[in-house]
Amino acid sequence: MSRIKLIVLDVDGVLTDGRLYIGSDAVEYKAFHTQDGMGISLARQAGIKTAIITGRKSNAVLKRAEELQIDFIYEGIADKLTVLQNLIDQIGIGFEEICYMGDDLNDIPILKEVGFPCAPHNAIDFVKKQAKLITKSSGGNGAVREMIDFLLKEHYSDEDLLELFLSRKTEVTQ
């Protein structure tokens, strides 16, 4: 596997458990896992850029992405592949340098193109067939962290990861 330079994530079913909580005030609530946040922070510290491409729009996603310093955020996207193509043209990398995690049909076009396609345990079977890594964890329950740990361990020992964390722990968000 070539060095991954960009991690791209779907939200519902990947960063969350896929359930939607909509209050009587029409506000949408989502639960995010802190271990996923730590993984994203570690990836950033290792020099890997991050992006979210999601079909829904949510203030909760924007807030979480801001906290985690996600580099690129795209919401309300029907054609995720076109958005990703524009992004890689903008930042000057190839599909082979991208890790993507998705869980449903709208993620298939990207999963077929990227260098390292991944799926959480709760993904639909068709998505899992496209993935090089299927996490033991489900979306919203540490799947993103599991994937990032897998990627980082290709280049870092456990001790190196700890040192990376300790050297910049003030910049880490869970």
Image: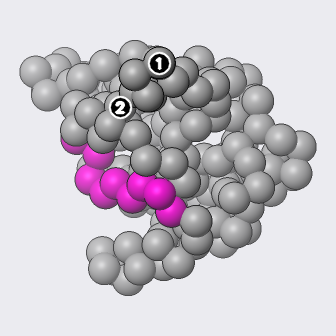
Where does the image place residue 9, in percent across and percent down from the top left?
51, 47
Q: Residue at x 70, y 43 (%)?
A: 103
Give amino acid for label 1. Ser
- Magenta segment: 68-77
Q: Is residue 36 above or below residue 74?
A: above
Q: Residue at x 88, y 51 (%)?
A: 126
In the image: residue 145, left or right of residue 159: right
Where does the image place residue 56, in percent across and percent down from the top left?
51, 48
Asked whether residue 75 is drawn in magenta, I would say yes
Question: What is the CA distance from the residue labelled 2 to the residue labelled 1?
Answer: 16 Å
Q: Quadrant of the C terminus?
A: top left
Where does the image place residue 160, in percent across and percent down from the top left?
33, 27
Q: Which of the labelled discs sits on residue 60, or is there none?
A: 2
- Residue closest to the eye, 87 or 93: 87
Residue at the far front in the pictured view:
24
Residue where numbered disc 1 is placed: 24
Quarter of the rendering containing residue 66: top left
In the image: residue 6, left or right of residue 95: left
Q: Main secondary structure of the magenta part?
A: loop
Where does the image place residue 137, in percent across and percent down from the top left?
68, 22
Q: Earlier in the sequence, mark 2 or mark 1?
A: 1
Q: Which of the labelled discs sits on residue 152, or is there none?
A: none
- Residue closest to the eye, 30 or 127: 30
Q: Is residue 134 visible?
A: no
In the image: residue 16, left or right of residue 59: right
Q: Residue at x 54, y 21 (%)?
A: 21
Give amino acid for label 2. Ala
Q: Is residue 33 visible?
A: yes
Mark 1, secondary structure of its residue: loop
Q: Is residue 18 above or below residue 96?
A: above
Query: From the viewer's perspective, is the residue at label 2 or at label 1 nearer?
Result: 1
